[in-house]
Structure formats: structure tokens, C-alpha cells
Image (cartoon, rainbow, N blue to C red):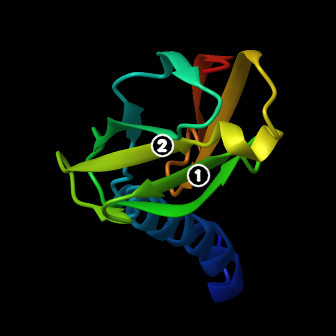
Amino acid sequence: MRAVSSAARYSRVVPGIVALLVLILLSACEAAPAGKINILTTEAEFGTVLNTDPVTQVFEVRNTGDGVLDITGLSTSCSCTIATVSKDSLEPGDVADLTVTFDPGAHNGATGQFVRQVFIQSTDPENPEAVFAFRITVVEP
């Protein structure tokens, strides 16, 4: 019978224990539930407006994820467009109003068709910047 040193025994046992502990830790570390942004209307037609009259429309932004969704920023493609949200933190299933205002006066009387975008930054890991677009036709009075 051959004697096995304690160092040799530990060299076989320790890696097995370490591997088991790593597996236990990995199985316990599930990803935290995340919010998911859902803009019910991603493109809209604002119709025809006079070049003197701002127009405002409201759209819904919904959290369809399992975790909290934070709206971290809003920006627009042009200074003629202003966007706001009614809430910047949405629990799962919550809805916020996205209010979009187009002011044709920012274009100094220009007429024609315009396409503008609103960029909604959020904590959605799959879609950190959602885009809402609209078309509008501006005419003289």
C-alpha cells in the first residue's frame, strides 16, 4: 500500500471544492430584473399646421419589463421641438406621458414638410436610447 502525502490529497480536493463554490455562487447570482421601454407609437403624423402656431401631442411610454425603468434623459433633433415626460421612474407596468411640442416659429416662417425626432435615454439594457419620430407639414396662414 502506497502512502499518499497530505499535500497530494489537498491538491486533488481543493480544486473540486473551489469549483463547487464557484457553481453555487454563479447560480445564486441571477441578473437583476430590468425595465424595458415601450413607446406605443414610435412614428406619428402631426398633420398640417400654420407656421405661426405651435402644436402639442401626447404619447405613452410604458415599462414592459420586470424591473424599474428610469428615464435618464430626453433630447430632440431640432430646437423647434421640446419633449417632456410626466414621470422619470416607472415601475413594471407603469405608463408615463411623453409630451411633444413642435414650434414652427423656430424656423422663421419656413413652410414645408418636416421630420423631427425625440431621443429617450433610459436604463433599458437592450434599448438605452429609444427614438420617437414625427412628420408635420407647415403652411402659411
Q: Nearer the viewer, residue 126 or 98?
A: 98
Which residue is denoted by mark 2 in the rendering?
Answer: 100
Q: Residue furthest front?
A: 141
Q: Position of residue 52 (x, y in %)?
A: 61, 37
Q: Is residue 132 left or right of residue 95?
A: right
Q: Does dot 1 land on a helix, a strand or a loop?
A: strand
Horizontal and vertical percent position of residue 61: 34, 41
**Element class at badge 2:** strand
Q: Residues within 10 Å of mark 1 (few under 14, many from 20)?
A: some
- Tell me the amino acid under the disc marked 1: Ile
Residue type at numbered disc 2: Val
Query: Which image quarter holds the N terminus?
Result: bottom right
Residue at mark 1:
82
Separation (CA) of disc 2 from disc 1:
6 Å
Q: Residue furthest left?
A: 93
Q: Position of residue 106 (x, y in %)?
A: 75, 46
Disc 2 or 1, which lies upstream in sequence?
A: 1
Q: Is residue 110 left or right of residue 44?
A: right
Asked if 51 appears above or below 56 in the picture, the reply is above
Residue 51 image position (x, y, % from top left): 65, 29
Which is nearer the eye, 24 or 82? Answer: 82
Task: Give the residue drawn at x 40%, y 57%.
Answer: 85
In the drawing, does residue 59 fall left or right of residue 103? left
Is mark 2 in CB contact (under 8 Å) with mark 1? yes
Q: Using the image, tell me which numbered label, if any, was put on residue 107.
A: none
Q: Residue furthest bottom?
A: 6
Q: Is residue 13 in view from this perspective?
A: yes
Q: Quadrant of the C terminus?
A: top right
63 sits to left or right of 133 = left
